[in-house]
Image (cartoon, rainbow, N blue to C red):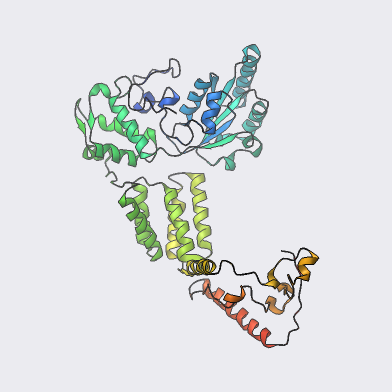
Amino acid sequence: MSRRGIVGTVTAAPGLFSETVSAAPLAHRLRPRTIEEYVGQRQLFTPGTPVYDAIERGVLGSMILWGPPGTGKTTLGRLIAQRVGWTFEPFSAVSDGVPRLRVIAEQARQRLLASGARTLLFVDEIHRMNAGQQDALLPIVEDGTVTLIGATTEAPSFEINAALLSRARVVVLQPLAADDLFALLQRALRDTDRGLGARQLTADVDALHALSRWADGDARRALGTLEAAAGALDDGETLTIELLERALQQRLPRHDKSGEQHFDLLSAYHKSLRGSDVQGALYWMARMINAGEDPMTLFRRAMAMAAEDIGVADPRALQMAVAARDAFHMLGAPEGLIPLAEMTIYLATAPKSNRVKVALDAALASARETPNAPVPLHLRNAPTKLHQSLGYGASYEYAHAQPGGVPTHSHLPDEIAGTVYYEPSALGYEKEIAKRLEWWAARLSERRAQPSDAATGQEDG
């Protein structure tokens, strides 16, 4: 998709937005009027991607736009309707009811019968539709009376019924990248028709970069802050980072998500968790959140840390990290930051062990050194009589038929039999695992010292 229009001259699409724009907020005035002006989401709106190609061919199917605030979901719905030449009908899940939905459906049917014209029904906050609204919506989507585009900040599978969800493609919108917001802020300063260009303001590059990061992917937040800060300037003045901080009454982050400081902060967070310093972990977590870091970055690091540095010393640690990530997906910010903090506290205070990683590294190294070690005959699958005649599966000891559930044979290739990869620590749940391993080892030693009278069993696979 062409990127023209982001920082250059803006071409208006007559009638797309009928509101008077002169007194409207900057974020409203700068809404894109063509898809080419739409900022961000390049993973979706470039030639060759399914959504873009469907729009260009005019064969649009129903979809749910799922993404954080400020990513332009409503605007995108309007732009898609404009591009395919369909009638755009907005519906609010909060303020509109089933009677309004029936009116839209009847008008859509008449339009379709009279001229073949299609209707795009845009449902804002679709996750807040009640059961009655969803039941009324389903048949008109199913029979093609309307094509649905729903907008939501919540995970669709939690709030939208399965029948409706199965008829719509879920399109995930990402928070706008800092570079996209930077370009948008530049455009706002230059645009003399809808932006602040008539005031001939300039801005330090550092100030715009800081504001782009602070806005955390939200275009409305970025533009609203720029407009507020500009209100404190005289025409022709320069916006500095100090003036921005004065307008916001807070310090702006100097944290660059792609730079060295990003990795330093993330490293400090991980090492605080590993070192069981809950205060340090919470601090570095808060530093990154205040700097506009994507919380998913912290959740990914926390899941890796739970596996690498806690492991089975506390098997619930990884579960906690995954559950906290899912909770954030459902809640969004700021409520979703509470599970993030809860996870941080849990991981920092959990018993630590790296024995899982040590075992993995040792097993991988051993597998590389013995890539052709044959599977012992007693462990091989014996699906045919020929395989059985060759000794496949012979003398296999079915664990459930053995005293204590302990077979006497080895489960490793002969050349590495007896190798130990995993040795539990004496911390947390690994103490219990150590007891089990000691018990099994003792039973195995006892059984191997006894005459062979073990019951055997044959099992496919």
Is residue 192 in sight in this rendering?
Answer: yes
Quadrant of residue 445 within the rendered picture: bottom right
Query: Is residue 67 or residue 96 the one in the foreground?
Result: 67
Q: Position of residue 285 (x, y in %)?
A: 37, 54
Residue at image location 51% in from the left, 74% down from the top: 424
Horizontal and vertical percent position of residue 196: 28, 25
Q: Quadrant of residue 164?
A: top right
Q: Nearer the viewer, residue 41 or 433?
A: 41
| In this rendering, position of residue 359 left or right of residue 235 | right
Q: Name the side, left or right, on which 267 lies relative to 451.
A: left
Left or right of 443, for residue 419: left
In the displayed image of the protein, which residue is found farthest to the right? 385
Residue 241 position in % (x across, y down)? 23, 39
The vertical placement of 99 against 214, above or below, is above
Above or below 19: residue 437:
below
Residue in the foreground of this view, choosing between 86 and 415: 415
Numbered label tally:
0
Vertical order, 36 against 126 (above or below): above
Does the image show residue 93?
no
Splitting the image into 4 quarters, where does residue 389 fall? bottom right
In the rendered image, the quadrant that contains the N terminus is top left
Q: Using the image as rendered, state which of residue 75 and residue 205 is in the foreground.
A: 205
* Residue 318 locus on image (x, y percent): 51, 59
Q: Quadrant of the C terminus?
A: bottom right
